[in-house]
Every structure is written in C-alpha cells, then in structure tokens.
Amino acid sequence: MTTAPNYERIQGPTGVPIKAWVRGVALEDTARAQLMNVATLPFIHKWVAAMPDVHWGLGATIGSVIPTHRAIIPAAVGVDIGCGMMASRTTLTANDLPDDLKQVRHSIERAIPVGPNSFKQTPTASEASYAKLDAGLAAILAKHPKIGTKRPDKQLGTLGGGNHFIELCLDQDNRVWIMLHSGSRGIGNMIGRYFITMAKKDMEAHLKDLPDRDLAYFNEGTAHFDDYVAAVSWAQRYARTNRELMMQFVIDALRCTRGLPAFEANVEAVNCHHNYVQKEHHYGEDVWLTRKGAVRAGVGEMGIIPGSMGARSFIVRGKGNPESFESCSHGAGRAMSRKEARRRFSRMDHERMTAGVECRKDEAVIDETPAAYKSIDEVMKAQADLVEVVHTLKQVVCVKG
C-alpha cells in the first residue's frame, strides 16, 4: 500500500508546484502568495518546498527551500546570511545547577556582547579566527567597497539582536546543554543588502516582469553572480565561526561561575546553518539550493529545531526525504509580526508565559514572547517524515539579544 504524502500540494495557474508540510499548522495567505510568486520563476527545479514554520519574509517566505538552475535570488538567501544554530551537551546535570540561575544568566551576558554591541577589545581567540577570514573579506571589498564594514573583527563571537539567543537547556535525561542562535552579524547584513540592491539594478529593465521586485536574481555568467557567490560563501563561514567562538566564550564563562562544578563540554555538538545557499545534487541535477529558514536534513545528518523562549526545542536526525530536498524547519516560525505581538501582549503576559525560565521579563522582549510563535509541537508533528527526534530540550536560562 502506498503511503499518502505528508505535505499539501499547492499549484498556481502558472509555475511549478509547491509541496508544503503544513498539515495541522496555519499557512497565512501572504506566505501562500509569496510561495506562488517564487514558483512562477523560470529557473525553479522541480518544485518549491515549504516547511511547517513557513511565514512571510522579504521577497520569499521564511521556511522555504528553493532549488534553482543557474540562478540565485539574493533576497531569498536574506540579510542574516549563514544564520543558524549550535548546541553542545555538557557533563553537567540539573542537580549541578544553582537554585538561583540569575547569576548564570549574568555570567553569560557579561561574556557575550548582545544586541548591536560588539567587543571593545577583540578577544585573542577572535583575532586568531578572524585572521583566517580577513583576506577573503578584503578581496570582496576590493571589488565592492560600497559594502562597507561594521568592524567584523569586533563582532566575531557576539550574539546580535532580534530572535537570536543563548540558552541553557535540560534534555530528557536532565543533562545540561548550551544552545545558541546567531549569524553573520553586521557584515552579513551589509553584504546581503548590497547584493539585493545590486540584483535589482542589474535587472532594472526586467523588474516589471517579476511578481515581486525583491525576487530580483543573478544568472550564472552575469557580471555579479560569481561575486555574490564568493561574498555569501564568506559570510556563511563567518557565521559558523561566530557560533563556534560564542560557544567557547559561554563555556569559559560558565567555568568561572561560582557554584558550578568542573565540567566538560562538546560531548555532543551540532552546528548548522538555516539561512544559506549552496550547490547540491537533487533529482539527477546539480542545482543551487537556497534554504531560507530551513535546515539540511539528509539521512543521518544532525540538526537543531528550537521552539520559542518558553517552549521545547529538539536535536533531530534527518531522514533524507527527497521531496523536501532533504530539509526540515528551522524553528517554530512566527505566528504574528513583532508589532502585533507588542500590541497584543503585556509584560505580565510575558512573565506568565516564561515562568520557570531565567530570562529578561521586560517590555523590550515582548515581541519574542512564546505566544508570538507557532506551536513547536504542531510543527514537529507536521514534519515527522522529515526528521526524527534525538533529544528534547527545555530551556532554564535564556539570554536574548
């Protein structure tokens, strides 16, 4: 007996189909329209895949997987290039944590600049890591000096703002994990915005033919295609290095926190992008695969799917489902805009929804409150054919940017 597919098939009047893993999860009309826009582009390979956390984004939805022939859409990759997750299991257990976790949170906040902040003095570890990246950026800026910089050496190993976070979590066996979410910081943002604008300029005469101006793209062989690939690849390396350094800084901070016993870290570690593009082989062809808010989930590949700051998160193993282009969701996905969350919820609501988590409770983080996101349990159920759960994590400390 053939098993029915677990996705909803969407077909517009023109273009390729969309396979959307949204059963039991709301798919907003604006996101559906964006998916159909992307599906009409002439270089899409086979279909567009939408993950259960899919929601509106710039040009293309966040939570979509876009395979393309000889073309890349910079806005689909986005401006938080290489954004992703890292998680490391430690030898600590719940019994090793102090009753008052505020000092633990403050130790992390003192060690890691958050929001728009950067290091005043570049740490030695960051200097050594940045030295390996510096020549690549210099080559990019030599051709495109208008990209500019925001002292990327001083932002390497920092968190950023928005939905970026650092957490201490307990797994199903009460073992302590460190989990963090960040990307390529200011320099990635500047690279992304620069090339999105450049794509629009290059296509100026043809923008009217696109369903959305933000879907402007570079074709292979055109003037800026190779430059964009070089720049986005560099930003993805920067983002991965950023997470690795941050993880080490958090580990060092915890080892200096009074009341915590000696411990080892990186017993199990996962580091995965969820905003990126790379060349992959799918259905017999080499294509550019853009995951905008999606994680690679090839057979046996490990990934991280976080919930909101008051919900569970998951360490997963990919099942290699070819119809999703070996991908899964990157989180719960927003259920409403930041503006709507601030309008709808109060500080008291936020305190109630984050009870039991040592985190900021002020009004500045209300747009990140748990109810602003979809149910992570419904998201996981909708993608049961894409990944299997290896560890279930519940945060006890959350540092927000």
Image: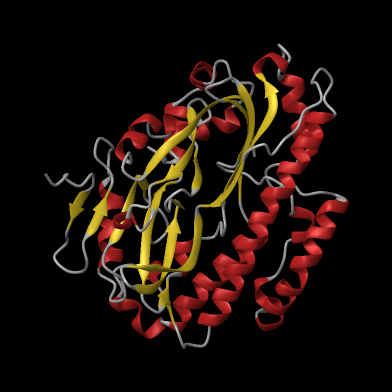
Q: 206 or 45, which is in the foreground?
A: 45
Question: Which residue is more in the foreground, 42 or 98?
Answer: 98
Image quadrant in which you'd find residue 52: top left
Q: Quadrant of the N terminus?
A: top left
| Residue at (74% x, 53% y) in the render | 155
Judge left or right: residue 21 versus residue 215: left
Residue 263 horizontal/vertical position (percent): 77, 28
Comparing 283 with 10, the one in front is 283
- The answer to whether 78 is drawn above or below residue 30 in the figure is below
Residue at the (44%, 33%) spot, across then down: 341
Give percent across and percent down for residue 130.
78, 62
Q: Can residue 69 be seen by looking at this rendering?
A: yes
Image position of 175 (left or right of 338): right
Residue 61 in sight here:
no
| Left or right: residue 38 compared with residue 181 | left
Height in image: 176 above or below 373? Answer: above
- Residue at the far top in the pictured view: 99
Task: Name the quadrant of the C terminus.
Answer: top right
Residue in the image at 26% along x and 67% along y: 46
Q: Residue furthest front?
A: 1
Residue 93 in the image: state x and y as whole percent. Answer: 67, 20
